[in-house]
Amino acid sequence: ETGVTQTPRHLVMGMTNKKSLKCEQHLGHNAMYWYKQSAKKPLELMFVYSLEERVENNSVPSRFSPECPNSSHLFLHLHTLQPEDSALYLCASSQGSAGAKDTQYFGPGTRLTVL
Amino acid sequence: QKEVEQDPGPLSVPEGAIVSLNCTYSNSAFQYFMWYRQYSRKGPELLMYTYSSGNKEDGRFTAQVDKSSKYISLFIRDSQPSDSATYLCAMKRNAGNMLTFGGGTRLMVKP
């Protein structure tokens, strides 16, 4: 596997379900990100883990819970979601360096549908 | 007002045309500007990266930044059907790794 991989690629869940999205990066990076991409809206940064420190967008509901056990793996735990949470969830990684040119590389995304 | 504005399109052009894609932004703190290309059912991939004002060329692609007008552009010369995708502009402040994205412009290049 190369680059950034995400599983599953598609997920359909009910509002009472609990599920998790998984991301793995094979680039030796130190920072990982979760983004939400909804139709006709800009990519929205949800969470950042950089050198094991977590930064979050305060507008993200608590029904989304990230976990970063090490620098190569990132999870997004989902529970009691709403239909408006249906979107493409993208994972990205970067070197996480303090320098300005810290390029983010994206995975293919998980298409989530909440019924 | 959104921090970064981008016309959603779709923009339809014939093969071989010159394409101009644009973003405007409101925050003068942005210093680094990027263009990502996103094919259907794929994640975004970085196309161009520029710092401050000026032009940067890479093959058929030219990125232009005008900080005085808070306006950035991506030009595609000799456009190909394989260029059909959604193009996202992104930008960030001097430090940190928080990117702010535009909503994306969908481009269709017809053979």
Image (cartoon, coloured by chain):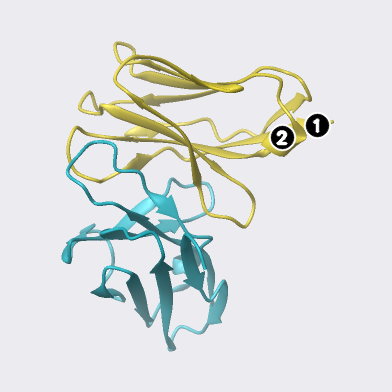
Chain colours: A cyan, B yellow
Does residue A113 sit above or below B51 in this rendering?
A: below
Q: Which of these two is toward me, A20 or B97? A: B97
The CA distance from mark 1 to mark 2 is 6 Å
Residue at the outermost bottom position: A17
Quadrant of residue A21 in the image? bottom left
Q: Are callouts 1 and 2 both on one chain? A: yes
Residue pushed farthest right?
A: B111
Q: Check the image and report above or below for A45 versus B83.
A: below
Q: Number of labelled discs?
A: 2
- Give neighbour class at mark 1: few <14, some 14-19, many 20+ (Cα, 10 Å): some
Label 2 resides on the chain identified as B
Query: Along the horizontal axis of the image, is A99 left or right of A108?
Result: left
Q: Is residue B8 left or right of residue B82?
A: left
Subunit ID for the residue under disc 1: B
Horizontal placement of A85 versus A61: left or right? right
Residue at horizontal 44 percent and vertical 68 percent from the top? A85
As drawn, the label of residue B108 is: 2
> Type of residue at label 1?
Lys
Of residues A67 and A113, the one nearer the viewer is: A67
State the image coordinates of residue A29 (x, y, percent, origin top left): 31, 58
Residue A60 in the image, given as x and y percentages of width and height: 28, 63
The residue that label 1 is drawn on is B110
At mark 2, the secondary structure is: strand
The answer to whether marks 1 and 2 mark residues whose Cβ atoms lie closer than 8 Å is yes
At 37% from the left and 48% from the top, the residue drawn is: A104
State the image coordinates of residue B78 (x, y, percent, origin top left).
71, 20
